[in-house]
Amino acid sequence: MSKSVKLDSTDLKLLALLQEDASLQVAELAEAVGLSQTPCWRRVQRLREAGVITRNVVLLDRHKVNVGVTVFVSVRTNTHTQAWFDQFRATIEAIPEVVEFYRMSGDVDYLLRVVVPDIGAYDKVYKRLISGTQLFDVSSSFAMEELKFTTALPLSYID
């Protein structure tokens, strides 16, 4: 389990750098934050062990891997049992085009972000979605233009 960790300004600088480029070498990180390599490496390890850093990934260009269309899918259901949810979640997890999945408050029960090459591909995803679970309403909105996209979390709220 992750431990609680107190973060200082150097930790915040490290996290900001790593959110922008997780492939930075310890020497580059150390130089950027004004530490020698060993203390810098120890800080990064401490952040990993505490669960602040959860994983390192490579981000791909959606267009170059032919999934340039983003669809936001709002789902409403009349059923709110654990068995229904377990089946719905399994259906969603089996669809790789669904890259984000949220349980919501308000009028919409679930929100999905789906990436596909085109409307025809989305139709196939939609058919898989509705065949896997009983749903009350599914509404799809196609993103016309991506105006901001980042995976970097804001760090200004850390105590």
Image (spheres, rainbow, N blue to C red):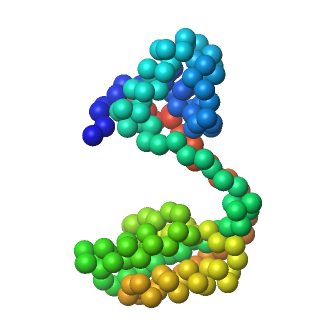
Q: Identify the residue at image location x=53%, y=87%.
A: 127
88 versus 58 height, above or below: below
Quadrant of the image occupied by residue 48: top left
Q: Identify the residue at image location x=33%, y=85%.
A: 78
26 versus 145 height, above or below: above
Apparent side of residue 18 relative to residue 144 in the rendered image (left or right): left
Apparent side of residue 29 relative to residue 91 in the rendered image (left or right): right
Q: So how many labels did they put on this image?
A: 0
Q: Residue furthest left?
A: 82
Q: Identify the residue at image location x=66%, y=53%.
A: 60
Q: Quadrant of the N terminus?
A: top left
Front-most of residues 122 and 94: 94
Q: Position of residue 77 (x, y in %)?
A: 38, 82
Q: Position of residue 105 (x, y in %)?
A: 39, 67
Q: Quadrant of the C terminus?
A: top left
Q: Identify the residue at image location x=61%, y=35%.
A: 23
Q: Position of residue 6 (x, y in %)?
A: 36, 25
Front-most of residues 78 and 115: 115
Quadrant of the image occupied by residue 132: bottom left
Apparent side of residue 147 relative to residue 54 in the rendered image (left or right): right
Asked whether the viewer can see residue 143, the reply is no
116 versus 124 height, above or below: above
Apparent side of residue 14 relative to residue 157 in the rendered image (left or right): right
Asked whether the viewer can see residue 122, the reply is yes
